[in-house]
Amino acid sequence: MPDPVTARVAAIPRTIALVGLMGCGKSHIGRRLAAALGRVFYDSDTEVEAAAGRSVREIFADLGEPAFRDGERKVIARLIDGAPVVLATGGGAFIDPLTRAALRERALCVWLRADLDLLVFRTAGRTTRPLLLTGDPRTILGELMEKRYPVYAEAPVVVDTRNEPSEITTERVLEAIDAHWQTQTRQDR
Ligand code: S3P
């Protein structure tokens, strides 16, 4: 038997889309969220890679970032078109105006907000993220925070992620979604 919060969130007829910077935990928390809600989980980067038949890094190198954003937009449009799922979006997806408009219209967007130290720590040693390979990751992530945080703030649900067990973050995400949805539906009545 799911607890009442999980049961209420599971009944929300919308895809839950996690947005936020690289390393904030979208995929990790997204998987846990999907398991708790009994929903299918998608990671937009994985789906873009499957559609393109190459890795994100190869797409950036061979075709360029604009081509990646086009593919990402198409993939996300497809994923939010069907039954409600949990979707972890790539860090730049919500920054693309068209993708953001689609996500805001069709999904319930949750920003996983994290501080710079946590993002640097979580992304360290990985070579899969092309944007972090062009210079000092801390400097790049700091610049992206400045540019992107005001945009992520358009997500209706914001959860601060910390260096804590992922079950706790997942629980806090469920509670934040539940509180938001209850307020929203009360306002609609
Ligand atoms: C990007 C984030 C990555 C991936 C690509 C570009 C970005 O996804 O989509 O490397 O622009 O922030 P994650 O946030 O899942 O690492």
Image: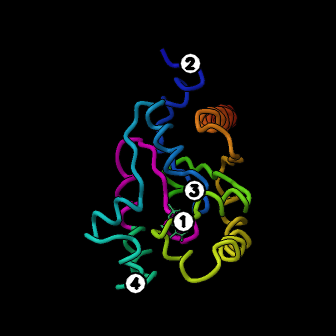
Separation of marks 4 and 2 at Cα, in angstroms:
46 Å
SS under mark 3 = strand
Quadrant in which residue 4 is drawn: top right
Q: Nearer the viewer, mark 1 or mark 4?
A: 1
User: Which residues make up the magenta segment?
Assistant: 74-100
Label 1 close to label 4 by CB (< 8 Å): no
Disc 1 under 8 Å from ligand 1? The reply is: no
SS under mark 4 = helix
Of the image marks 4 and 3, the number of the one nearer the N terminus: 3
Q: Which of 39 and 99 lies nearest the eye of the viewer? A: 39
Asked if residue 44 shows in the view, the reply is yes
**Residue 116 locus on image (x, y percent):** 72, 62
Q: What number is the disc on residue 61?
A: 4
Residue that badge 3 annotates: 19
Separation of marks 3 and 1 at Cα, in angstroms:
22 Å
The residue that appears at 70% across and 76% down in the rendered structure is 139
Q: Residues within 10 Å of mark 4 (few under 14, many from 20)?
A: few
Q: Nearer the viewer, mark 4 or mark 2?
A: 4
Q: Residues within 10 Å of mark 2 (few under 14, many from 20)?
A: few
Q: Answer whether residue 94 is magenta in the image.
A: yes
**Residue 148 locus on image (x, y percent):** 67, 69
Residue that badge 2 annotates: 3
Q: Answer whether residue 153 is magenta in the image.
A: no
Q: Residues within 10 Å of mark 3 (few under 14, many from 20)?
A: many
Residue that badge 1 annotates: 125
